[in-house]
Amino acid sequence: MPSGFYGRRALEHFKSPHNCGEMSEPDGVGEAFNPLCGDRMRLYLRVEGESIRQAAFQAEGCAAAIAAASMTTLLVEGKTLDEALSIRDEDVAKALGGLPESKIHCSILAEDAIQAAVEEARRRRSSGPNKERGS
């Protein structure tokens, strides 16, 4: 893969992803999958009050999928749940310094994973404090 294909930030996040790995006892988990290319992203959120205190991810797929998932964790941490819901695929791609047109689906996966993780965190909260986590 020629280095000019992806921007510097995207390559950095692919080579040294941030917050990679499964999170124990998350408050919300969102998964997104692209059946055409097989890319899969799982986003874990730990929420305190209305703010996302910690985020982590697991991803399978191309360099852009890994980079987008890594960047997504940085974009959501410290945001309120509402602020996280306002993050769009264009925001993820821009934060990575852009993505090739053929890889935009990876930033769309990130947006979908955020939406699903926030929805689950809210659903768990509405069912009572930490009922899902057994605390």
Image: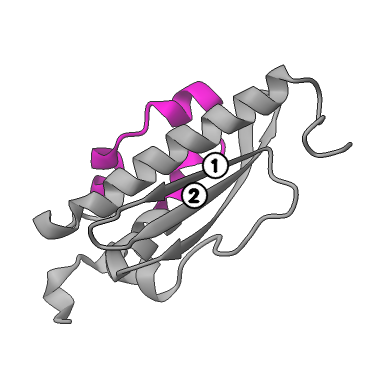
What residue is rendered at 69% in x and 27% in y? 124
* Stretch of the chain drawn in magenta: 71-95
Tags 1 and 2 touching, CB below 8 Å: yes
What residue is rendered at 86% in x and 38% in y? 134
Amino acid found under the numbered disc labelled 1: Glu
Q: Is residue 26 above or below residue 56?
A: above
Q: Is residue 93 above or below residue 126?
A: below
Label 2: state its secondary structure: helix
Disc 1 to disc 2, how far (Cα)? 6 Å
Residue 66, percent from left and from top:
38, 64
On the picture, is 43 further left or further right than 107? right
Which residue was labeled with disc 1? Answer: 77
Q: Is residue 7 above or below residue 134?
A: below
On the picture, is 81 further left or further right than 28? left
What residue is rendered at 53% in x and 37% in y? 117
Which residue was labeled with disc 2? Answer: 73
